[in-house]
Amino acid sequence: MSRWNRTGKGKSKKKGDAETASTEPVFSDVRIVKPDESKDIAAELFEAFSDEDVPADGADPSEADTAPTARTTIAIGGDDELPDAKYLDQELGGASSDDSGTVFIDDDGTGDAIAAKDATGRGIEPRLRQRRIGVRRAEGRRRLKWAAIIAAIFIVVVGFLAMLGSSLFSVNEIDVAGLQNADAAQVEAVIADLLDQPVLLVDTDEAEERLEAIAFVEDARVRTDFPNSISIELRERVPVATVQGTDGQFRILDAEGRVLDVIGGQPVAFVLISGTNPLDLSEGQFASQGYASATSIVTKLTPAVRSRLVSMSVTPDGSDLRFVLSNEPGENIEVRLGVAITDDDQIQRLVRLERVLDDVLGTNTTVIDVSTSETTER
């Protein structure tokens, strides 16, 4: 419904001009009926709504001076069926009681317009009342329509989520890949907690954290497969060395120095590392920097060195790393690497060792020092 407002007032003249210029009121989607065109309508309405008698034709001109002045009629046109109730109220509410400022509204051009004071009085014209009621009802129907749409969407969403959270989509199948050395009982405990959970409500991050807390598990990936299954992929740590604790038991370490297992007997498949501060760690804990650097260098040994490796020793801070190589039929050779904590330091020292190893094997050499850039033998 279009908004309508008056944008001009009255007539204006310029003195001294031969011709006069008039400015008519301008409206949006309205037609102005000039006073002379609405003479009969105004007289009829005045007679209908005024307590005074309308002067008859031929009456004394002096009596005609008391007749109401001509009034402006606004005819609403365009494509709108009804006037906008909001703007209509604003215009009518601000109407003056003075007849000279009275505005008439003619919505169909039939001449049955009413005055503002009559439209806003207690006895409002029935046709305007019906139009106002119609507008309010239309607005109410639109609000009810949107409320119904929102309620329907809400019900559908809630129902959908409730269905997905029901037992129809609960986890009843779990596939595990990559399980070899990890504690099967700990893995099964995680699986048991995942079973029967709604598949869309499974906390995969929490499940991965619990699996990675298992000593042998380096990385875990948990994925849900709709509608009711889960897949678990495990990547296990690789044991490379062992350290004996003060309790006589041996700790199995990986390349990062994590304790993967604690066993009673010495495992012959792994390099034995000794030190001034024996490890008394539990499964899943990490060793000090010195032991971590020792286990790390084991993974960088070439086959020629690894096949002759007898043992390794290291200080807790990693400032003095050594290992012993067999040199049959002569005495074993001690290799001194010094501070070899970073990967670059370890690789540089191993390269220097490889350059001289073939020359000293089978000789009386017992020490090879590669801790500096200048390799020494004795």
Image: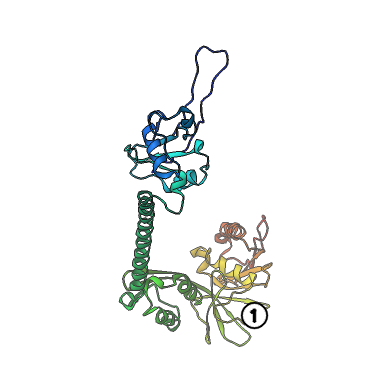
Residue 180 appears in the rendering: yes
Q: Residue 20: percent from the left, percent from the top?
A: 50, 17
Q: Is residue 328 left or right of residue 315?
A: left
Q: How many marks?
A: 1
Q: Residue 365: percent from the left, percent from the top?
A: 63, 66
Q: Quadrant of residue 232?
A: bottom left
Q: Is residue 307 left or right of residue 286?
A: left
Q: Nearer the viewer, residue 282 or 69?
A: 69
- Specify few, some or many for label 1: CA neighbours under 10 Å numbering under 14, 14-19, or 20 or more: some
Residue 29 appears in the rendering: no
Amino acid type at mark 1: Pro
Question: The C terminus lies in which quarter of the figure?
Answer: bottom right
Q: Nearer the viewer, residue 173 or 127?
A: 127
Question: The N terminus lies in which quarter of the figure?
Answer: top left
Q: Residue 375: percent from the left, percent from the top?
A: 65, 58
Task: Check the image and report above or below for 21 versus 243.
Answer: above
Residue sitting at x 46%, y 49%? 120
Q: Is residue 97 left or right of residue 149?
A: right
Residue sitting at x 36%, y 50%? 131
Q: Nearer the viewer, residue 51 or 72?
A: 51
Return the residue at label 1: 278
Q: How is the image coloured?
A: rainbow
Q: Nearer the viewer, residue 375 or 105?
A: 105
Secondary structure of the residue carrying numbered label 1: loop
Q: Residue 133: percent from the left, percent from the top?
A: 37, 54
